[in-house]
Image (cartoon, coloured by chain):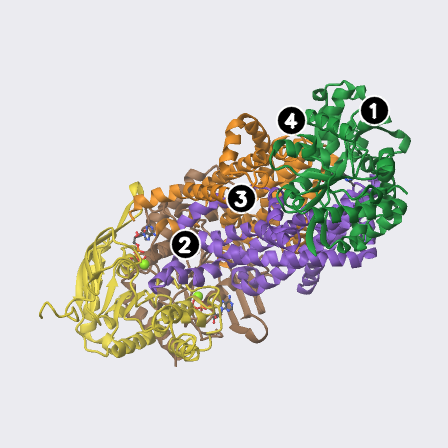
Chain colours: A brown, B yellow, C orange, D purple, E green
Amino acid sequence: MTPSMPASTDTPLVELRKVSLAYGSGPSRMLALEDATLDIAKGEFIAVVGPSGCGKSTLMKLVTGLLPPSGGEVRVHGQPVKGPIRGVGMAFQAPTLMPWRTTRDNILLPLEVVEPHKRRFRANKAEYVERVEKLLASVGLGGFGDKFPWQLSGGMQQRSSLCRALVHEPEILMLDEPFGALDAFTREELWGVMQALWLERRFTAVLVTHDLREAVYLADTVYVMSRRPGRIVKISKIELPRPRTLETTFTAEFVDIVHDLRERIHMEHA
Amino acid sequence: MTPSMPASTDTPLVELRKVSLAYGSGPSRMLALEDATLDIAKGEFIAVVGPSGCGKSTLMKLVTGLLPPSGGEVRVHGQPVKGPIRGVGMAFQAPTLMPWRTTRDNILLPLEVVEPHKRRFRANKAEYVERVEKLLASVGLGGFGDKFPWQLSGGMQQRSSLCRALVHEPEILMLDEPFGALDAFTREELWGVMQALWLERRFTAVLVTHDLREAVYLADTVYVMSRRPGRIVKISKIELPRPRTLETTFTAEFVDIVHDLRERIHMEHA
Amino acid sequence: MTDRQRQILLVAMPWLAMAGLLLLWELACIVFDVPEILAPKPSRIFEVMIQRWDILLRYCLETLWTTAIGFVLAIGFGVLLGLAVGASPFVYSGLYPLLIAFNAVPKVAIVPILMIWLGVGALPAIITAFVISFFPIVVNVATGLATIEPEMRDVMRSLGASQWEILTKVGVPRAMPYLFASLKVAVTLAFIGSVISETVGGNRGIGFLMLSAGARNDSATTFAGLFAIAIMGVLMYAACALVERRMTRWAFRGEIVS
Amino acid sequence: MTDRQRQILLVAMPWLAMAGLLLLWELACIVFDVPEILAPKPSRIFEVMIQRWDILLRYCLETLWTTAIGFVLAIGFGVLLGLAVGASPFVYSGLYPLLIAFNAVPKVAIVPILMIWLGVGALPAIITAFVISFFPIVVNVATGLATIEPEMRDVMRSLGASQWEILTKVGVPRAMPYLFASLKVAVTLAFIGSVISETVGGNRGIGFLMLSAGARNDSATTFAGLFAIAIMGVLMYAACALVERRMTRWAFRGEIVS
Amino acid sequence: QTAVKFTLDWVFQGPTSPFLVALEKGYYKAEGLDVTMDPGQGSAGAVQRVATGAYDIGFADVNSLIEYNAKNAGKEILCVFMAYDFPPFGVHTLKKTGITKPADLAGKKLGAPVFDASFRLFPAFAKKVGIDAKSVNHVNLTPQLREQSMVQGTVDFISGHFFSSVLDLKARGVKQEDIVSFNYSDYKMDVYGNGIIVSPALAEKPEVVKGFLRATAKAWKEVAANPALGIAAAKQRDPLIDEKLETERLDLSLKMNVLTPFVKENGMGDVDPARFARSVTDVADAFGLPAAPAPDKVFTNKFLPPKAERMVAP
Ligand SMILES: Nc1ncnc2c1ncn2[C@@H]1O[C@H](COP(=O)(O)OP(=O)(O)OP(=O)(O)O)[C@@H](O)[C@H]1O
Ligand SMILES: Nc1ncnc2c1ncn2[C@@H]1O[C@H](COP(=O)(O)OP(=O)(O)OP(=O)(O)O)[C@@H](O)[C@H]1O
Ligand SMILES: Cc1ncc(C[n+]2csc(CCO)c2C)c(N)n1
Ligand SMILES: [Mg+2]
Ligand SMILES: [Mg+2]
């Protein structure tokens, strides 16, 4: 690659270089993340697993620029991150829906804010509403658009929040335990939905999860983090062919990978 | 049993008789729960599983009297429930910690409110604080008592909420997905903690969960609910010997029960 | 108590409370033989109100519309300033002390100066009503913004929303319950502003009526004027409460369900 | 801008803003050749303040303590009434219209009656300060209570907490940011109340000073009095803001982190 | 010591300083009276304060009293000491308006506080000079606004006490020769001015009233001889007053309102019964009262000290 060529698929989309983050200052200072170094290529789907409180959510906020690192550097598109980056879709760990908006309006929010949708939002309103309805139906919430978030069950709120992260078709998708409050079947259904979307659009995705099967099913690379302060202790490339199906999850190869990851995390609990 | 004898272990502690619940009224009326009939004996540990949005959280609120049923009758201790009943510990689906209290003070809350602790709260403050610290340590949050809830990770908040439900040693324990935001190991550790507590105190417990292994590990009876409006479609007595261990979960019997439940829920997704 | 009885009682309460208060007043006047010049009996006040309803109504309407205009201006300006103060720590630290200083100063002392610049008439009344009532709105809107949950802010920031978008899409709805709380205070202040201005100069409005009645030792008419102001205040409040019901249902959801 | 520069600017802002305003005023006076009797130049006002600081201080202290007592009473009573109004729909519907009615009535019309019962002196000033400033507190505390998240209420209910416990353990902390917002408004009103009462009768406090200065067209002294009130208002506000920082940090956590 | 609450009609200024002298020098104390003295908000207010019993004694415009007594028959309040034999009431205008005689006031704009005694008496004055009071367009203005508004031309003329309006105008840079004043008394409206009024309850205790009047007359005599004494007392009460201005105000009021030929001859405090009776009718007419009160229900001289003690003219 000649230096004159623009950094494209060869430079990773997201680069973390020895990033650390400490909350608070003075005696209450607490290191949540230490020396995290990782690269995410454009179109890569990564998963982050690790014990509760190890800094996974913190890591996501660092990548999207919601938090400034205490040390090290975060780069996206080769540029150091100075503030919240554009073009991400983020499903936070809590649903964080706005109680004054109906579910539909909550999901329309990114379209009101993010270019280029914002510009044509008024003109294309009907079309956007239809898109939202489709999305709602795909996560099993057809017909609930008119309800307010506080009229939904916990799992339904979480799915709405997922829809909000997807609706503007972002380049980068950050999912913090997006299926945690769902039953096994709904969850596995949504894995399929998720994978299909990814295969179609090839966005870059970061998934935080406690479900190792979920991580292996969806991700190209799984990062295992240590207890707090979180460090990356294992990187596991998942070379399983796509599209993966529920059958894949019963193959020996799949089960082995899950088992390996499990063993590694178990060490953190010793 | 002679009629003059007080209803004791023979009458169930909690009785639901064809209970239904509809949210809203008029055109926006929506039936969340239909004809739920179940008995919970004193000291029984039951689990409720079912698809997302089927009315599990609603069921819990009905049992504790937080919601009045639209139809049917709820009885606790043989008395019809008219308002919130006393002596329950409840871990809601969301952590609902109070942001103006430290984690420790959040967990102390039931002791400030519930008799007989309330009466001696001031006098025994030190002892109660110690109790909270022990509880925090048992869920892996030792040393976090001074933090505010918004300084904790999602999983840590959930564990604090669990502590709050346990601290006053309630007669009835209601747990709405108490381990949903935890990694597998922390979760399994807490199963053990939970079971040990139950074996010691023999409280009556209702656990809502999406993890069938969790349900079977902990419960005496597992209830499977249908899609919304939720009805009880399967009742499964778990006769596995106690204490159950992680090894138990690998026995054929255990796996079979889980498989059966799984099949039944799968039908709901068809 | 059934739901229906409850409903009826709720509607009846304000009337019962008011009737109770007036009765107490009437009785106190009779028992303590209070001279009319001090505090007339409510029955006497109502008598005057009925007798002179046409004059009262005319003066009331004059006051009402200056107040309404001043109040609307106060809402507009108060919300904007509140947004600015709530959104920027610099505006906050620079402007808040000045605002407090300005508002601690009794407006009675300022109005004459205003009148010297603007002459007497409706304009100074509008301005006084505006000036006296915008502050609670600023404070409450600013507090509403400052207490936005950081989680909501993060949702917007992650979408790359501008400061302005965060303000309008989260800040404004979040601040609504605060705004409506402040309107209840502001509307009463707006009336006070109008009336003060009318007493300082001019020959219009309920303030003038009360003052000239006072000069004639006609305290029944003065009190009739006070009652008229009170009634207008409650009407304006009812209008605000109506809008509040529609716009902030989400914040009061706890009340609706249980 | 570094964090340090930011910090310095934040502290400097109120002074800069104030200086800017006064400068503008001074210039306007010079350019438009405003006669002193209309609006004195700030420089002249400060001259008077420095010249007569001892007298001013004496009067100020008189006003300050009546105001402070009235304000403290208003907080106590306002919080209690706010809790009652926020907690019970019956109290709400029965009392709110009455409160609005009472507060829409200009206190200047009520104070003379008060003085007849109580005589002139500190007592009517305290009561006026109290009466005028408790309403914003009631409204905001009540709104704070009414907007409690139902989830929090359920936590308490599931513990079998009494209405009173829900009120004190959830309602009060929840209403704190609202309370402090209202205190900012209430403290300015309390000053206005004191000063009004002092103007209506008595020979104490800044209100009397301004009255007598007004009667002899000594507007420099009148304005010196206004400035003194403004300064006291800001001082009281600063005291409230200090307490606010300590007590409602959780609600402003969004500001602290980012 | 008997506690006595005393209210002025207005703030502590030169013309009311004799009361302060009596207080500071202990003349009231010597009569066995413990007097508290408060400023007021106009004569009507002072009458009301005494009427409601909040104060025992007041200093107020006797015309306000006539109105009050007419409307509250059976609860009359008595004036027991006439201070301003010549009333300070009048209307004032500026040369530039072209108004030179009272008849020119017809159809003009009058700025006045509604409770200003000169304003309230204006209809009677209008009648005497033959103009229609209804043709005058009245605008309410607080005392702070009144003079300024005329200087700015917002109103054509104002009503007010001579010693306050003229001094206020001069303070605004208006020259004495540019001010045109019409004193009501110069147009056959010879009503009385301010006097001391007592509550019905206090009227039952003649010794107290007599003592009060004796002390007051004594102080007035001293102030008439030496105005600086009065100013010093006022200064003590209200440290911020402008001595020069108050001296001028006091001088004016003494010369014009207090030390009239009648007072020089008969002493201060009493009235000419015929003139007083006439003034009661005039005032009742001006205020549109249904019936004039009997003069002896408004003023009595039965509490006055002997004439010798009332000869205040130096
Ligand atoms: N706002 C904050 N202030 C202070 N400390 C914080 C804050 N947010 C998180 N922390 C601390 O940082 C550490 C990591 O938190 P983080 O939320 O990243 O964990 P996590 O890996 O997402 O955990 P979980 O799986 O439980 O969600 C925790 O120990 C937590 O206490
Ligand atoms: N406050 C409410 N107002 C109106 N509808 C509600 C309310 N709470 C719940 N519902 C509706 O009732 C149904 C059952 O909700 P519930 O919370 O009991 O489900 P759940 O079984 O707990 O689901 P999950 O597993 O997703 O938490 C849902 O369809 C939901 O939309
Ligand atoms: C010494 C003296 N000066 C002025 C007045 C006139 N006056 C009476 S009340 C009032 C204004 C009240 O706000 C004014 C200007 C007076 N009676 N005595
Ligand atoms: Mg997390
Ligand atoms: Mg639920």
Q: Secondary structure at mark 1?
A: helix
Query: Which residue was labeled with disc 1?
Result: E97
User: Which mark is on residue E59?
Assistant: none
Quick check: D28 left or right of A254?
right
Check if mark 4's residue and mark 3's residue have beta carbons within 8 Å: no
For badge 2, the amino acid type reads Ser
Viewer-proximal residue among B11 and C60: C60
Are the numbered discs 4 and 2 placed on the same chain, yes or no?
A: no
Alpha carbon separation for disc pair 1 and 2: 77 Å
Displayed quadrant of residue D126: bottom right
Q: CA distance from mark 3 to mark 2?
A: 47 Å
SS at badge 4:
loop
Amino acid type, label 3: Phe
Q: Quadrant of ligand 2?
A: bottom left
Give the residue displayed 33% in from the left and 74% down from the top.
B190
Discs 4/2, front: 4
Q: Quadrant of the N terminus of chain D?
A: bottom right
Query: In the image, what residue occupies the spot 47% across and 69% down?
Result: B102
- Quadrant assignment for the C terminus of chain D: bottom right
User: Callout 1: residue from which chain?
Assistant: E
Q: Is residue C254 left or right of residue E185?
A: left
Q: Residues within 10 Å of mark 3 (few under 14, many from 20)?
A: many
Specify the farthest residue to the left: B2
| Residue bearing mark 2 | A161
Answer yes or no: are tags 4 and 3 on the same subunit.
Answer: no
Q: Nearer the viewer, mark 4 or mark 1?
A: 4
What separation in Å lies between label 3 and label 1 (alpha carbons)? 45 Å
Work out how far the residue at label 4 is from the one at label 3, CA to CA, in angstroms: 34 Å
Q: Which residue is mark 3?
A: D102
